[in-house]
Each structure stands twice: as C-alpha cells, then as structure tokens.
Image: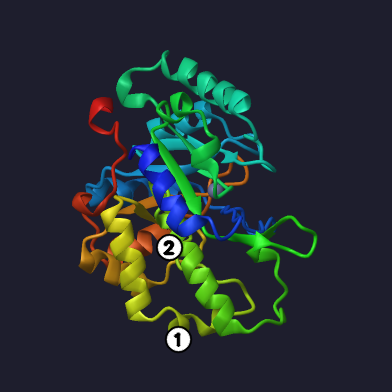
Amino acid sequence: MRKIFTAVLVFAVFGAAFALSASSVAAQDAAKPARTFEEYVPWLAQTGLDLTDYHIHLRGGMTAQKAVERARKTGLKSGVLENCGRDWPLSTNEILDRFIAEIEAYNATLPPSERVKIGIQVNDRDWFKTIDPKIYRRLDYVLADTMIMGVGADGKPQKLWLLPKDYETDEDVWFERYFQHCMTVVNEPVDILANVTYLPDFIADRYDELWTEARMRTLIQAAIDNNVALEVQAESAFPKPRFVELALEMGAKLSFGSNNFDDVLKDSSAWKATIERFEIKNENLWRDVNWEAAK
Ligand SMILES: [Zn+2]
C-alpha cells in the first residue's frame, strides 16, 4: 500500500473539482443459480497459480471463517472487505476499527498461511482524507471502482448502474467526464481497481468507440505507475478482453475477485476464461503489501 499522504496532493489536482463516490455494488441477479467454486478446484490446481480472491464482501451471511473454510477446500486464498463511506456499512473510523479488529482477532487464531487479507472498498472520493492513518496502516489493501460519479437529482451520490437505459445526456461530454473520474480514482492511494472500463447501460453499446486504445493506455499506465491491480471479477462484463490484452502487454498486474452478495460465491467462469485466454502466470498477478510475510 502506498503512503496515503502523497494522495492528498493528487486529490488537489484531480479530485477537487467534483464530489465523487464509487462502489462496485451492482444489481444482483438472484434468479441465476450460483456455481460453487469447488467445481474449479481441479482446474485451478493444474494452472499452478497462487490465487487470492481479493473481493469477498462480509455481507449476506459471508464471514471470514467461511472464507477460510473455502480456502482450505480450494487452495484459493481470501481477501475480505466491506464497503466504506458515508452511506455504507463502514461509515465511521470507529466502525471501521471494530470491523478490522474482529478480523484481526480471528486471524490471530490461525497460522500465518491461513490468515485472510483485510481490505475495504472505498466509495467516497475523499476517503483518504477522512480515514484515520493508523487504521489505514492495518489494511492489507484498498479496493475501488468507478461506478458512482457526481450527484443525482436527489442530491445523493449518483450510482451509475441505476441510470435508465434511455438516460438523456450528451454522451460524449458525459464520457469525457467519466474518463476523468476513472483517472481520479486510479490516482487515489488504492490498490485494486474493480470493474475497470465499466459503462452504464445507456452508453455501454459504444464501448469500443469510446474506450479508444489511447484512453485505455492512459488508464493502464496510471495503474502501473501507482501499482494498482486491475480486477477480473466473477460475472462482470468489465473489463473487456481487449482491455485485458493491452494491460498485460503493457505490464499491468491483475487481481481476481468475486464481489459476492451472500455466502454462495459466484460462478467464476470469467476468471477461468481470462486465465486460459491470456495464459496468466503468477508474475501477472498483483500481490498485496504483506503477501510475502504470510507465507
Ligand atoms: Zn464490491
């Protein structure tokens, strides 16, 4: 994890113009049957990859204990987190302190190799100015996405996935603002960027046109410069293969995440497809700051 204080300067440059927020909470398709990750165990073992799922939300009945049980069965390590921000479960430093302390206490009962990584998903764009630095230092990683931008008609942070498919706006102006928002987030002291190149429904069909190679390169280079992982998420359509290919070619690191809503972990076919298509090796995987210490 990078020093939080450098980010204050970055915020002054990129963030001051907007009051932005982000979250990777997407609409849950409850009707879709979830496959268990165990199905992938034989395949995962054969890849030789030392994988960590860095996007396990402790919500909907999911617990650190269950994550550890899964790790014992699958060999897939765990990073657990919850949403942090004014309108989110971890809304104050006190609550965040208790959240971390509970996982730390559980970790203390485990051998180092079995301990879960502790993270947060940050949803307010000034999070690094409000978080207690002492608490920040206890985190293994910070995850963000770009799916909340600006404020909606109700004065609340605008969750982009709630915009109607027929949302009326100047799309090119909107996208330019969104691209700057993506650059703001990737320059925060975050470690993982989830749902990279996400576009809401109203504009998603213009993906190839709007996400030009030049814009992709700018975003990827910032991720590389800041050691920010680009997440491949179970059941997310973003980022598209074209982006992943370019990111790997440029030397960016990937992380893999579930983004679960309950204790039934998601179908991870998207991970498998990416790993096989791009012949992902351990050197392509992003590692948190305490990775070696846990071995
Ligand atoms: Zn999430």
In this rendering, the label closer to the viewer, 2 or 1: 2
Look at 35% across and 51% down and name the residue there: 255
| Count of numbered tags | 2
Look at 33% across and 57% down and name the residue there: 223
**Residue 189 visible in the picture:** no
The location of residue 251, given as percent across then percent down, is 21, 61
Place residue 281 in its image quadrant. Answer: bottom left
Relative horizontal placement of residue 277, taking residue 237 as reference (left or right): left
Looking at the image, is 34 positioned above or below residue 132?
A: below
- Quadrant for the N terminus, please: top left
- Quadrant for the C terminus, please: top left
Place residue 90 in its image quadrant. Answer: top right
Look at 46% across and 19% down and name the residue there: 104
Looking at the image, is 270 positioned above or below residue 65?
A: below
Place residue 83 in its image quadrant. Answer: top right
Relative horizontal placement of residue 17, taking residue 152 as reference (left or right): left
User: Which residue lies most toward the right here?
Assistant: 154
The amino acid sitting under disc 1 is Glu
Question: Tag 2, which secondary structure?
Answer: helix
The amino acid sitting under disc 2 is Met
Look at 72% across and 81% down and name the residue there: 166
Disc marking residue 209: 1
- Colouring method of the image: rainbow
* Pointer 2 residue: 183
Which residue is at the front of the view, 255 or 121?
121
Label located before the other in sequence (2 or 1): 2
